[in-house]
Image: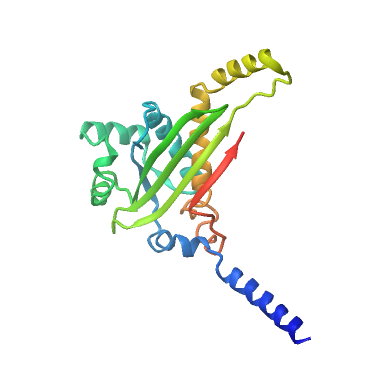
Amino acid sequence: MKRIVFITFAAISMLFVSCMSVNTRESQYPKMYSEHPTTILVMPPINNTTNVEAKDLLYTSISYPLIEAGYYVVSPHLAMEMLKAESAYDAELFVDQDAGVFARVFGADAVIFSVIDTWQKQGFGIRTNIRYIIKSTATNEVLFERQCDLYLDLEQNSGGSGLLSGLIDLAASAIATAATDHIEAARKANYYIFKDIPRGKYSPDYNNDRGKSAELRNTHVTVK
């Protein structure tokens, strides 16, 4: 009897500890809630790959999920023109510097840096590995940081077999990894990254998602 009681107590204790250890958005991103950034500037991505198009492909797809999450995003077109005019197109020069300059020039509360570590055709799909860092322009503190290792599966089910089927699959794979699919890979990676960001001022969930369970900082997904 004592053994049963002990096992039951141990199980309840483990469950209690497990529940207590679940991260919330507020506990994982406390500075997002204490600083409440409203206006965000998106910097051009830092490209650590040999895919020269990756930088522009990702840059065009970052703003939308942030807007959907309730933030005001400085116009990417305007930001790009100003950054190029000031020879500041390379975000590598600023990621470790004082972010306060972006508040003075763009009126931004926060600036987002993205780092592309992988962007390549792999098998019948595209693999991307992207890191995001949001820094405060007021305190220079990191407010939000996540990484996504995403595989976009573009395999076609031909229904055949043998050599002819293999050739068809190879041809389909070559077609499937066109520029539009690379853009889709970027959009999906951004979706999985920013689905966990605390909601901004222009979202109905603003300040109401503090207790929502936070996802892992490093996420790995395979999508079609």
Q: Please report the residue visible at 43 percent of the width from the left and 63 percent of the height from the top.
A: 30
Toward which corner of the image does residue 164 lie, by quadrant?
top right
Task: Give the side of residue 5 with respect to residue 17, left or right.
Answer: right
Give above or below for 108 relative to 31. Answer: above
Extreme left residue here?
86
Give percent across and percent down for residue 176: 56, 22
Compared to residue 172, the image places residue 40 above or below, namely below
Image quarter where the C terminus lies is top right
The residue lying at 31 percent from left, 36 percent from top is 79
Viewer-side residue, 142 vs 176: 176
Residue 175 position within the rendered picture, expressed as x and y whole percent measured from the top left: 56, 18
Q: Residue furthest bottom?
A: 2
Instruction: Residue lying at the far right in this picture: please name it.
Output: 1
Q: Nearer the viewer, residue 136 or 189?
A: 189
Q: Where does the N terminus fall, quadrant-wise?
A: bottom right
The residue drawn where x is 76% and y is 81% is 4
- Coordinates of residue 42 in the picture (x, y in percent): 36, 41
Q: Nearer the viewer, residue 172 or 42?
A: 172
